[in-house]
Image (cartoon, rainbow, N blue to C red):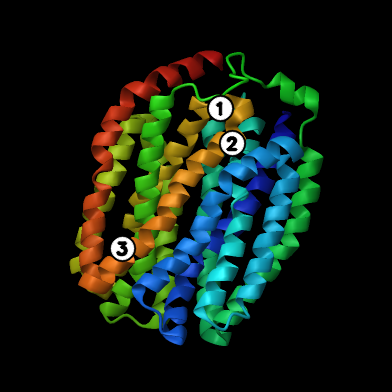
Amino acid sequence: MRPRRARATLVASCIIHFLHDGCSDLLYVLFPAWAREFSLSFAQVGLLRTGYSGALALFQVPAGFLAERWGEPRVLAAGTFVTAVGFLCLGTAGSFALLLVFLVLGGLGSGTQHPLSSALVSRAYEEGRLRAALGAFNFSGDLGKVTWPACAAFVTAWAGWRWAARGMGAVVFAAAFGVFFVLTSLAPGDEAKKAIRSPDRADNGWGIRNAWGFSLLSAIHGIDNGSRTVFLTYLPFLLLGKGAAMDMMGLALGLTFAGGATGKFVCGVLAERLGIIRTVLVTEAATGLGILVLLVLPVMPTLFLLPILGIALNGTSSVLYGTVAELVVPERRSRVYGVFYTIGIGAGALAPPLFGLLSDAAGVPATLAVLAAVILVTLPLARLLRPAIEPQRVGASRRT
């Protein structure tokens, strides 16, 4: 793809990522408001997170198959429209059941975004700076995680959570039209698609070059994403237990997400200097230990630690996403990215209610201590991953 068209594809994909990740993570601001208004338990709060994330996860692979038939732009636009409708309806919900239904609807629409946008960017930069492009794409999502929770916290404090949900729905609704027209004009033709096909593609399979490496990578991603979702879900409740005010939740989450966005770049530099495996070891160890330190700090020192913890908490993902493209042939990436994101987001969907039950029984601090121990399980998995991915990186560098 020509450099100008590739950059335009990247920008359009980044805007979509910015909006959809914002939709997902502004929910962390709304959870305490819902818990108070509808008298929800921690397990019910976790179930709301599961409703959105679970629907998002389940539609990843179907979205990849639909894109192979109808093209990424059409499926992305349709999914964005469905997400907008879910958030507009969310602003009218009057019960826990309706909250759950509308969150499921919004999650189904957002299920199109990650695999299809990642495939578009990977295709656009097949012969260029793929890892840098995916890093910029991932950064845009983190920027949405910083921006929209802060906006939602402000609107919720000023006008109530219903207007925060409706406002987000209106913005995403407008974006759905732009997605279709911009990305359709940038989509390559059939001849261009044939030109970028890999010579070692597997027509009758999923195009995964190393199944063992992909399995380990997905397992690390599942633990990483599940633990991040649990931490962000119950961080506001931890801060409230320390005596923080409700209007501080947006600031705390914003600081964490800002650190996460910075982590995309920091961990990219670390991966170049230390290698993928060492970078994963550093970030996961720092995440587990950082959570344990967080538990014993008062409110103000906690706020200073959150950006640093955010770097480690979110930095691993940028390393993992770029490695997926190296393990999969180009024409199968939409569906395989769908599998990869299904595993990660599925873990993020299942973990909150399970840890919510633990929180109801033992309290939020004890739950986060257990979470820190679970995160450290990624360390031996990362060591096993080394021999699986290094041959692939050598092969990729020879092809380019």
Residue at (46, 81) in percent of width and height: 33
Q: Do the residues labelled 3 and 1 touch (CB within 8 Å)?
A: no
Q: Name the residue under label 1.
A: 206
Along the polypeptide, which appears first: circle 2 or circle 1?
1
Q: State the image coordinates of residue 218 (x, y, percent, origin top left).
A: 41, 38
In the image, is residue 281 above or below residue 50? above
From mark 3 to mark 1, how far is it between C-alphas? Answer: 34 Å
From mark 2 to mark 1, how far is it between C-alphas? Answer: 8 Å
Q: Do the residues labelled 2 and 1 touch (CB within 8 Å)?
A: yes
Along the polypeptide, which appears first: circle 3 or circle 1?
1
In the image, is residue 148 above or below residue 119? below
Q: Name the residue under label 3.
A: 355
Q: Confirm whether residue 220 shows in the render.
A: yes
Quadrant of the image occupied by residue 22: bottom right
> In the rendered structure, which amino acid carries the disc numbered 1?
Trp
Q: State the image coordinates of residue 231 (x, y, percent, origin top left).
A: 34, 61
The residue carrying pointer 1 sits among few (fewer than 14), some (14 to 19) or many (20 or more) residues within 10 Å by Cα, namely: some
Element assignment for label 2: helix
The residue carrying pointer 3 sits among few (fewer than 14), some (14 to 19) or many (20 or more) residues within 10 Å by Cα, namely: many
> In the rendered structure, which amino acid carries the disc numbered 2?
Arg
Q: State the image coordinates of residue 275 (x, y, percent, origin top left).
A: 35, 29
Front residue of 53/157: it is: 53
From mark 2 to mark 3, how far is it between C-alphas? Answer: 30 Å
Front residue of 107/295: it is: 107
Quadrant in which the N terminus is drawn: top right
Q: Name the residue under label 2.
A: 335
Element assignment for label 3: helix
The residue carrying pointer 2 sits among few (fewer than 14), some (14 to 19) or many (20 or more) residues within 10 Å by Cα, namely: many
